[in-house]
Image (cartoon, helix red, strand yellow):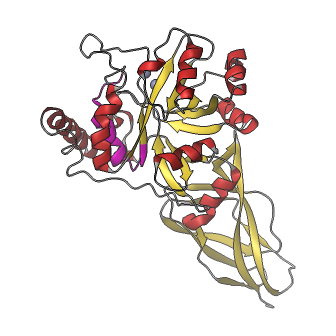
Amino acid sequence: MGSGKCRYTVLAAALVAALLMPSEALCQGMSRREIAIPDVLGYKAVMCDFHMHTVFSDGRVWPDVRVGEAWRDGLHALAITDHVEYARHKDDIPKKLNRSHELAMGPARQAGLILVKGAEITRKMPPGHFNVIFTQDTDSLDTPEWRDAMAAAIRQGAFMFWNHPGRDEEVWKAEHTEIYEKGWLQGVEVVNGSRYYAHAHKWCLEKNLAMIGTSDVHGTIDMSYDRAAGEHRPVTIALAEDYTEEAVKDALVSRRTVIYWENELIGKPEHLRAIFDASSVEVLTEELALKPKGRAEMQVRNTSDVSYELELDGEADDIWARGKVTLPAHRTVRVRIGRRPDTAPGEKTIRLPYRVSNLKVAPEQGLQVELSIRVKLEES
Ligand SMILES: [Zn+2]
Ligand SMILES: [Zn+2]
């Protein structure tokens, strides 16, 4: 119900914006969801979506609607990436390749969002579809030869990533090796909309490509995600030095990205560990006293938007713990632990080894973490 009303308001606001007051009316009366994923390692967690379409290719919305949606979804940066070659509505809307970005610039500035210029190079060939972002002039990408289009983008300083890269590893062809070896191919969509590409995840690890997650939205965000049910679009979290276009680009080029998709984070172990540790998960119980064979509960708080799914991965000395633990988003839970029989008394710090299945460091592989707790093993 809530989303229906919002959708109506967005459409109504977009109509007013298009006719009367571009940009101003777009987000009036709306609230923005703030994504609770902490800043880590001295970097800002900059929320980005670099793949979306408007009526200037085969999307169904005016460019400023993309800005309004991005603001509501808690993003800091977006790129409108209309197809260079495919203008589905060209009988109604003239093919103007730079126009969607131009129209979104004012609203983005007003909303305080970083609008990165971009386009989707969409050719029939083994390579497939590629997004180029941080470009200058989309007209110059409209060339007969795909290599010329990519070369033009690269000359403009583009960061290029491969979109929705097919079913399996077989889709990687000689052309991909070519553009990879030239340094043109810098990232790949591990997530596009509702799809996760395990083979693309593997390529990122093997070839040091940036992990990218995007919505590739064509309709409205509200038509694609049920906000009321807690759904959200895929987000690329750029770990950037600041909220600027330059810093975001540096984060991508330096491969500091984490994908926030459904209830998962996908990224490098060091980044995921930092997110898990930094304010996301905290053991609140200072010390637990345990008699021989005694049981107790420790309290663990999770202040992030991700509900962590933990599975025990090994054994701790002296103490047993529950095999499966869920740490729900924005909750504190009590986790049962107990003292093993025949353990010597004393005070010590116990590290409980877990694997977090939805902090993905590789396909089918969760991040290893530890929950530390101080225990006092009493005489009797
Ligand atoms: Zn499209
Ligand atoms: Zn697309």
Residue at the outermost bottom position? 379
Q: Is residue 14 left or right of residue 142?
A: left
Image point 61% across, 21% down: which residue? 166
Give yes or no for residue 315 being in the magenta stretch: no
In the image, the segment drawn in magenta is 59-77
94 with respect to 315 (left or right) = left
* Camera-nearest residue between 52 and 81: 81
Residue 349: image quadrant is bottom right
The reply to whether residue 262 is in sight is no
> For the view shown, which residue lies furthest in the front direction?
155
The answer to whether residue 209 is above or below residue 95 is below
Q: Quadrant of residue 232?
A: top left
The residue lying toward the viewer, choosing from 222 and 307, is 222
Q: 293 or 17, which is in the foreground? A: 17
Residue closer to the observer: 95 or 316: 95
Going 53% across and 18% down the picture, which residue do you hit?
Answer: 149
Residue 292 in view of the camera: yes
Side of 190 where 89 appears, left or right: left
69 drawn magenta:
yes
Judge from the rendering whether residue 101 lies leftward or rightward of residue 48; answer left or right. Answer: left
Vertical arrangement, residue 75 with respect to residue 83, above or below = below
Q: Is residue 116 above or below residue 314?
A: above
Q: Quadrant of the N terminus?
A: top left
Residue 306 picture location, percent across and down: 52, 54
Q: Position of residue 246 (x, y in %)?
A: 51, 47
- Residue 20 pos. (x, y %): 12, 36
* Image location of residue 45, percent across then percent down: 52, 55
Q: Quadrant of ligand 1?
A: top left
Count of residue discs: 0
Q: Quadrant of the C terminus?
A: bottom right
